[in-house]
Image (tube, rainbow, N blue to C red):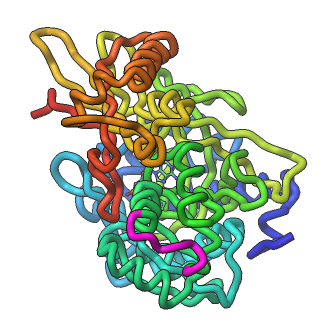
Amino acid sequence: MRYFQPDIETMPLPKLRQLQSERLRRLTAYLYERVPFYKQQLDEAGIRPSDVSGVESLHKLPFTRKHHLRGHYPFGLFAVPQQEVVRIHASSGTTGKPTVVGYTRQDIAVFSEVVARSLVAAGCQPGMKLQNAYGYGLFTGGLGLHYGAELLGMAVIPISGGMTDRQLMLLQDFQPEAISCTPSYAQALAEQLDKRGIGLEKLKLKIAILGAEPWTEAVRQQVEVGLGVDAINIYGLSEIIGPGVSNEDFEEKGSGSYIWEDHFFPEVVDKDTGEPLPEGAFGVLVFTTLTKQAMPLLRYWTNDITSIYYEHSKKRTHIKMGPIRGRSDDMLIIRGVNLFHTQVEEIISYFGHLSPNYQLIVSRNGALDELEVKVEVEPSFHRGLVLAGPWAEAAANNPTLHAMHHELAKKIKDNIGLSMRVSLCEPGSIPRSEGGKLSRVVDLRKK
Ligand code: DLL
């Protein structure tokens, strides 16, 4: 068994609970003393730090939400003097000011530690090379993976996102065993290798560490075949620390990602009532940072929808989370039906001749919302088709495509309860990730 920190990763649950409880007690007192926002929040809820006996008291504490971070822009929630802050990151929102986070030297040490743990879980080892194609900058992906990989003893190739020609050159010339990037960019790289006729025997890649956006088993399949790797999930968010809040184990692929519970205490709550939900139920993921110094957060409402559960027979004692279904603020409400784009992606994945490259286009026709799903057919299937003339016309006249079109529209209607316009497209016609997060939904109603 490979671990970065066996004592912590396999700590018996009663001992882990004790550690978490001690840390939570310390954290509550620390925030009450140092951050006026938290003093006010706790006072308003009628809670004194001494009322918090351990993690079983957590549900009494108020949530922290993104608008609280925005309302204290830029540094209003920092709990340490400015001279103790050694790094600042920010995530850009869709509107207005970014969400700002700060780190002390100790926070960076914890950040590196959880990323190193995550990399070992992904199958990485000291001595391997990591092509780090997450963006460097205010985004936590680039520097987060960088420090964690160095701590583990990997050689980091800090290429950042994008510049596909150079990525492909270094993959061949530097022979890294691992790559880290968004799943949509891994798809784009796999496609380019194929397009340029670069055979996998020219690469040494074994592991891809993918995260920062939702992805499905169909994408895993495409990336694993296209890059010749084990594709492993890494999850995180800037507000909590960055990447490395949870990670999949390479020997337990598809069964969820271990949350590093000694640092980040997870809860899943009902998205409407905020009530804690039992293990296995779907709801909003909420984290309390147990060890952060510069900007710790109590019960941070991530907006990410998933479930958490223990798998007692597995390698580690820490709790696992399933894949993120979507963010509750990204949920589309179309003619009264709630929809995450990953639901459409899952249906598409049952069609062997359709690729995981798709886009949802939402528009408004009078008072009515309309939805179109554009999806590319698989390149190999496409090569086998005999089509004459422009694609759209030829596709409409092709009986196989016509039947597939029909079947997809029906499956969507049956499973989701919504009628959507379906457009099958030529390979390469839907925008690809240029190195960062890819938006699968184009909402023309907001324009
Ligand atoms: O995306 C941190 C990160 C970098 C994670 C590199 C993994 C790899 P933010 O920009 O603050 O931070 O965005 C956080 O991205 O709340 C999720 O909605 C989404 N997200 C992150 N990882 C995953 C994942 C980084 N593995 C937001 N699966 C989170 C699904 C993910 N969604």
Q: Name the quarter where the C terminus is drawn.
A: top left
Q: Nearer the viewer, residue 436 or 21?
A: 436
Q: Is residue 445 above or below residue 194?
A: above
Q: Position of residue 124 (x, y in %)?
A: 68, 76
Q: Position of residue 21 (x, y in %)?
A: 71, 53
Tell me which residue sits at (23%, 17%) in the image.
370
Q: Is residue 22 above or below residue 157?
A: above
Magenta-highlighted residues? 195-202
Tell me which residue sits at (41%, 42%) in the image.
382
- Is 196 inside the magenta-drawn segment? yes
Q: Nearer the viewer, residue 288 or 368?
A: 368
Q: Is residue 180 above or below residue 323?
A: below
Q: Name the quarter where the N terminus is drawn.
A: bottom right
Q: Nearer the viewer, residue 226 or 44?
A: 226
Q: Position of residue 208 (x, y in %)?
A: 57, 66
- Is 198 inside the magenta-drawn segment? yes
Tell me which residue sits at (58%, 85%) in the image.
129
Q: Is residue 79 above or below residue 329?
A: below
Q: Is residue 328 left or right of residue 178?
A: left
Residue 333 picture quarter:
top left
